[in-house]
Image (spheres, coloured by chain):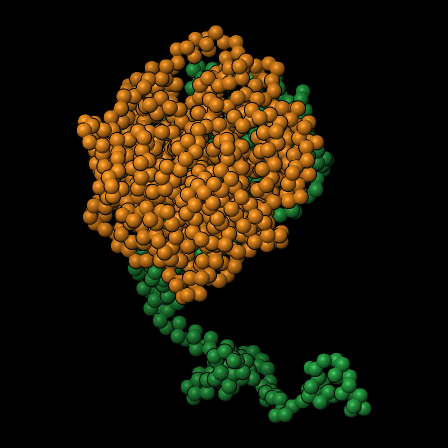
Amino acid sequence: MGEIPEKHVGEAGSPKQHTSETASLPDQVGNVGRRTMEELVEDICASQGKTQLSLGPLEKVYVFWLAGMSCDGCTVSVTGATEPALEDLLTGSIPGVPLVILHHYVLQLEAGDHYMQSLLKAEQGKLDGPYVIAYEGSIPDENLTAGGEPFAGEGSLPLWAPSTERRRVSTAEWVKRLAPGAAAMIAVGTCATWGGIPAAYGNITGSMSVMDWLGADYRSALGLPVINIPGCAPVGDNFTDAVQAILLFLQGLGPLPEFDELGRPAWQFSETVHRHCVRAGYYEEGVFAKEFGDKECLVEIGCWGPVVQCNITEKGAVGHQGGCMNAGGPCIGCTMPGFPDKFSPFYKSPPGSLFSSNASRLLGSIVRPLRRISQRERNREIRWHETVPSGWAMEKGDTSLTHKILEFFYEAMQFQGAKRPEKQPAKKFPPGHQSLPDRVYDGDYQVLPEEREKKAEKRA
Amino acid sequence: MCFKNLPIEFDAQGNAQLIGGVANPYAYTPRQIKRDKLEELLARNGHIKDVSISPVTRVAGALSFHAVADLQERKFLEANSVATIFRGYEVILKGRDPRDAIYISSRACGVCGGVHSTAACEAIEMAFGISPPPLGTVLRNLALALDFLYDHPLHLFLLAGPDYSQVVVEATSPAMWEKAQVTEAPNAEVHQFKTIGDIMKGLNPLSGKLYLDGLKMTRTPREAYSVLFGKYPHPQTVVPGGMSSTVTITDFNETLTRLQKMMDWTKRMILLWDDLTEFFYGFNPEYKKVGARDKNMIDLGMWDDPDSYDATYARCNEWGEARWATPGVVIDGNLVTTKLQQINLGLEEFVEHSYYENWNQNGVRFKTDPSGAPLSPNHPWNKETMPKPSKESWKDRYTWSTAPRWDRQVVEAGAYARIWTTAAAGLMPKNDFLESTGHSLKIHMPKTMLREMDFEWKIPEVWNAFERNRARAYCMGYNLMVGYTMVLKAFDYLRKGEDKVSTHFEVPKGERIGVGFWGAGRGYLSHHLTLDKGAITNYQIVTPSTFNASPKDPFGNAGPYEEAVLNTPILEDYSRPEDFTGVDMLRAIRSFDPCMPCTTHIYGGEREIVREVNTCACSAEG
């Protein structure tokens, strides 16, 4: 808190009454600031003094956030992102990264037609910069609602008309209208990337992913297939990180971001979540949690981590904190195309773990005791032999013959092919040892200074 | 006797029964909506304006609003709240293993990201006959306190806040902006914003300090939430019979650090909303009518007492009243009940003006609740709605939201309802930080970087948009102290060695019934479920925004958003009708903190929707 730079504080400036494009539109319903968020951002940037130095060809990029069959969880995740943070992208505060003008129904200043008109502008190619679509939620089959109201609607057309002359526009229609001209189409969250819960068994709305809906042949204006950032909800940073990586590449600054065969950012999703799990070591030693709340590996109480591609255990959920298994939550595969039906019923161990966890249990039964023996000796200082000077519990060293033999061979292997430091006899303080102050002050140097002075006088 | 309209009476022992001698006790004749006069007025045009706001932004999810405004008389003649999304979640749940309900229903809403999983969990616990160990309950409470500590600031500073910012006030009421700049903020010493104008500047989107700090502070509780529950939204540690969090001292210390940060910030922020509210009232007392409604509200309470909660329906009144937020229904400003069973009995859902067919022809599945009290055929346990996508018509059907009612009265839900019922009931468990006095809630916040401070939310005289926001600001303090108390309780259980967080369960094979009475960031949340042969046979979710965004009911009463807009005077400045922005009605709507994903997960019934619905979408065009 309080780290807002002074110049950021409350300087939106006055509305430029007559420069505003929106002022001349048929009505002002929903335009509560009498200027749109886009115009407001321009004002903010102007009040901060726009830099003349351009670090690349792009000055600004529009991002249209559309939501279909969504729960808004992806939006909420993205507001939690910190690397980079949303507000930094939206105010053009990251050097080299173009200003991101986000058009999002949760954050926009204006409502209604003033909000919707930008989408039409984008479709007609009238924006002063390229645009990207971020799509949250799955896309329902609106053929099922023909003649009725759509399952997922956003806005109504024609703009500025009375309600009885309007028709509500489905988000699917917006995708159809805007996808061809978009510089990139980013599907955010598992519903948009693969279909997610709305597309699970029992799906009566014909819901599907953006990829399913647009088809494998879809290419954006920049020639890209759909970019997929899965997760239910995704780690917010995965979205902002991917956006920043793409923008920096387009600016000619960053390296080429790689995507895998399903369009996921490869640097975020090529590893399984198990590989970076804080509990993976338990798996390796064949130790498994039996009850919810146990600290060991969660595979046998329903964790699918070993086969799930996700980075939450290393990246954390919000501000590098948490991550499902780190906190005790078994992975239910929410980043995967098979979610939820190929991972349910939840809280039941994955069938594959019958083989793999028993194999690691077997291996673990050998590795674990050996490690404990080595660990025990590594818990000793080289000076400690018979006794350990700890007042807690471990007072005795291990002096048994087997231990000495084991340790002899262990040490021989440890220094094989390497120089072993000279073994020095451990120096112990002789009994009755006096430190320098003890000798000077007669053993009571810790008493008060005045008394010490008196004593010193006496000695003198 | 809490029911005025339902045919239920209570015997000497307090057991509910149907009033005798009524043939069809729950029957009713739907009232038609008439708008001929209005259409005539609209046709004459002039100052009568058809206002269409699609979408309403700065709310969660897909909401549209239609209204007819008289720009000369400066009032609204008609209001329609329109939910524009349908996902059929409850159909997806039907026929599944009940263990899936927690994580699937969680995805009904990602805004307050762990409320559905917890409500589902309580419903399952009732159906399974299990209950969590004390530390499990404490963790659950802590999760929800942290959840709302993100949720309320998000609403106050990012969603509603901009409507009170310099940008909006200067554009819609220049005179107010002039006055704000020279009006000293009474609590400036606490919140550090010298004038009301400074507060308004602070609320400017993407540049104001309050806006940016608010966004940052939404992350702090979410970090703590992630530490304990894996991620936000959709926590990964909610299990039947408890939680699966592995708790360590460090986890609680990390949580405490973040609670302390929240305390420092919250102490400054609460009174800021007092100053803003009083300034608007002072500038023009008419602002007291913006978003005004009768004082009718409902809440199920939440934050269980670990020693009382046993997940049984039979004892729900006892464990309900032992909660840290007291369940209750307020009618005309009076608390009429605090009993969960009575609240449950009064609940009905109507679909006359929604895109669903009525289900009553299929017979009534449950005539009584598990305790033998009478249950309406319109109760969620009996509900079986068929979606019927049809054409929008203001006279007929116009939304995907249903109309839930309590005792056939329009009640609203919200964090403010929670603090209201808790303050009025005087049943808050004894503790050092929160006290319910019967007319107010006292909040004591200990010393942090800032000195210790006391706050008192008093049940307001008037009920409107400003009071909803003000109450939400006080709720930040309320949640915070519940959260802090839960950390202390968790330490206490750990000290006693009671460190179990979950309990063993088996999926029962017989017929079972359950309900989760819980709360979301926006208040009331219930999950009703029935199981048979180890699978879900019916699943019904009623959310706060289903209440608030509801359309008109068959008795002719408008839903809460609609009613609030109808009561709102148009106070903004405009010289020509084209300059009208609708800021007053938007303030009214946003004060409810609408959350549409929650509203419209709604159930779809067994019937598959086929293309033929085109032909049966026969409603008359409005």
Kindly identify the residue that appears in the image at 40 percent across and 72 percent down.
A368
The reply to whether residue B550 is in sight is: yes
Residue at image location 64% in from the left, 44% down from the top = B190
- Residue displayed at 20% across by 28% down: B22
Q: Is residue A219 visible?
A: no
Q: Quadrant of the C terminus of chain A?
A: bottom right
Which chain comes out green in the rendered image? A
Question: Considering depth in this image, is B345 or A66 the residue closer to the camera?
Answer: B345
Which colour represents chain B? orange
Residue B357, placed above or below residue A387: above
Residue B35 point in image, percent of width and height:
39, 14
Q: Position of residue B398 (x, y in %)?
A: 38, 22
Task: Name the spot of residue B587 as percent of width and height, x first.
Answer: 53, 29
Left or right of B259: which side holds B240? left
* Spot occupied by residue A302 in the image (x, y as percentages of width and height): 34, 55
Q: Quadrant of residue B426?
A: top left
Residue lying at the far bottom in this picture: please name it: A431
Picture layout, residue A325 above or below residue B110: below
Which image quadrant for residue B406? top left
